[in-house]
Image (spheres, rainbow, N blue to C red):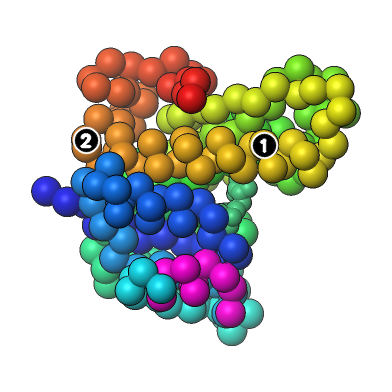
Amino acid sequence: MAKRIVVLISGSGSNLQAIMDAISADRIQGHISAVISNRPGVFGLERAEKANIATEVLDHKAFESREAFDAALAELIDSYSPDLVVLAGFMRILTAEFVRHYQGRMLNIHPSLLPKYKGLNTHQRALDAGDSEHGCTVHFVTEELDGGPLAVQGAVSIDAEDTAESLQQKVHKVEHQIYPLAVELFCADRLQWSEQGVSLDGSPLSSSGYRYNG
Ligand code: GRF
């Protein structure tokens, strides 16, 4: 059965676009029921409207507390009864209660080879550390920021001439490959997170997840 997906965004939504494209190409056994943004007027909302996907704006600034916003957000998400919630550049720290409610059915993408470089400025930090490799990770979301179990990773090489900007561009390209892949695997019931950990096709994945090699 096709899975119902809700995507949360705060910005340009290029990862949202990559997932929409994979759905249009019949790669993903699912459809996007709604795209929800915490920021009005962002380009990701336009992308969704163009594809005739329902859009919602829930502006966090209109709420008195993080808890109140997250409660309203969960109510809005749940009105679409999603099987999967996809965080695609959703720039909010989420409360533990919210995260627990979607445990095992909420994915995020982070621009580093986790567990390296949780948080911000990941490209500069990889450069400053003299790393030869960098990349991005799709992971299940837990209460620990950027700390949930890893599902899919994709790497890029760091070359002598790379800057934070050039690395960001390289990593973004890989994001657009691994996020649709992770959603595809989840929607086909091939990728799961249970008490035994993350598994792919019934076999446990290593702690660094499935390594995507293009
Ligand atoms: C991506 O770099 C992702 O890793 C981070 O936010 C950015 C979202 O980009 N979590 P976009 O809105 O999908 O273009």
- Residue 104 vs 65, above or below: the answer is above
**Residue beneath the point at 57% across and 79% down:** 40
- Residue 8, percent across and down? 47, 62
Q: Residue furthest front?
A: 25
Contact (Cβ within 8 Å) of mark 1 with mark 2: no
Position of 128 with respect to 73 (left or right) is right
Q: Nearer the viewer, residue 178 or 98?
A: 178
SS for dot 2: loop
- The verdict on residue 48 being magenta is yes
SS for dot 1: helix
* Amino acid type, callout 2: Asp
Give the magenta-colored segment's residue range: 41-49
Q: Nearer the viewer, mark 1 or mark 2?
A: 1
- Label disc, if present, on residue 170 of the rendered structure: 1
- Label disc, if present, on residue 119 of the rendered structure: none
Position of 18 with respect to 104 (left or right) is right
* Amino acid type, callout 1: Lys
Density class for disc 2 (Cα within 10 Å; few <14, some 14-19, many ≥20) is some
Q: Kindly identify which residue carries mark 2.
A: 189
Tell me the chief SS of the magenta region: helix
Q: Quadrant of residue 137?
A: top right
Residue 20 in sight here: yes
